[in-house]
Image (cartoon, rainbow, N blue to C red):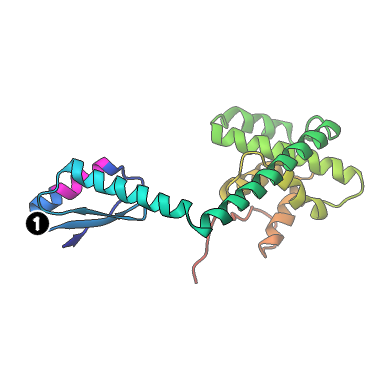
């Protein structure tokens, strides 16, 4: 028996075809793990049979999950998430009505250049959330709240795109370049990761292995 190494993002049909080809080359049963389930290409098994076995195992796993205590816990978590998300949407709508209509730009030229070159949906999502975040913080700062005290909670309201760690770091970088309080935000962000620096933004998506 030979263990087949599935590449990230591989499609089921392609994996099965590769396994059948490997079986013919090595004259052995080929086995792999695909999406948490065993996939086996034994002698005499056709592409259709291998796929059918996989779908059968997947259906059985799904049935077991739906009957488990884990499913009930997950459903409660989902309900709680939806409740919180509904509240976040209401809070975002309300605070943006009283916050500045646009964030205060420190470097208009840099701001316009970033908007000009960053046109992908990914970049637009980052800029959208960052702009909402800055507007909320500006409003709260105008009330006498420090950036340090309102940055994290403001982001939790502003983020309606589900920013990843990398996207979050990019939003801080964007604001640090163009926003009136950007440098203060950059320093606060870096301090939260234990870094004191005069330049640069810590990338929260980078994991350091020691």
Q: Is residue 160 left or right of residue 61?
A: right
Magenta span contains residue 200: no
Badge 1 crowding class, 10 Å Cα cut-off, few under 14, some 14 to 19, many 20 or more, is: few
Picture coordinates of residue 196, whole percent (x, y): 70, 62
In front of the other: 136 or 187 = 136
In front of the other: 91 or 202 = 91
Farthest residue to the bottom: give it: 210
Question: What predominant SS class does the magenta segment belong to?
Answer: helix
Q: Quadrant of residue 177?
A: top right
| 57 vs 197: above or below | above
- Report the residue at 71% width, 40% height from top: 86
Q: Is residue 23 visible?
A: yes
- Report the residue at 67% width, 47% height from top: 172
| 32 vs 181: above or below | below
Q: Quadrant of residue 31?
A: bottom left
Picture coordinates of residue 133, whole percent (x, y): 74, 41
Numbered range of the magenta stretch? 13-20
Picture coordinates of residue 60, whole percent (x, y): 36, 51
Q: Which residue is mark 1?
A: 26
Q: Is residue 28 left or right of residue 109?
A: left
In front of the other: 91 or 204 = 91
| 68 vs 84: above or below | below
Q: Is residue 27 left or right of residue 171?
A: left
- Report the residue at 64% width, 53% height from top: 201
Picture coordinates of residue 36, whole percent (x, y): 36, 55
Q: Secondary structure at mark 1?
A: helix
């Amino acid at each position: 028996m030979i263990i087949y190494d599935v590449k990230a993002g591989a499609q089921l049909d392609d994996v099965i075809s590769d396994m059948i080809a490997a079986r013919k080359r090595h004259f052995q049963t080929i086995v792999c793990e695909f999406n948490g389930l065993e996939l086996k290409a034994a002698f005499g098994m056709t592409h259709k049979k291998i796929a059918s076995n996989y779908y059968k195992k997947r259906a059985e796993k799904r049935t077991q999950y739906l009957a488990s205590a884990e499913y009930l816990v997950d459903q409660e978590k989902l309900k709680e998430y939806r409740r919180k998300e509904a509240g976040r949407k209401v809070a975002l709508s309300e605070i943006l009505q009283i916050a500045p209509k646009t964030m205060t730009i420190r470097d208009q030229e840099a701001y316009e250049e970033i908007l000009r070159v960053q046109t992908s949906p990914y970049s637009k999502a980052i800029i959208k959330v960052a702009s909402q975040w800055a507007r909320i913080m500006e409003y709260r700062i105008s009330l006498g709240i420090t950036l340090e005290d309102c940055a994290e909670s403001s982001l939790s309201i502003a983020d309606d795109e589900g920013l990843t760690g990398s996207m979050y770091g990019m939003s801080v970088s964007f604001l640090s370049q163009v926003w009136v309080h950007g440098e203060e935000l950059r320093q606060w962000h870096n301090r939260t990761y234990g870094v004191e620096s005069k330049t640069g933004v810590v990338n929260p998506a980078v994991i350091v292995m020691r």
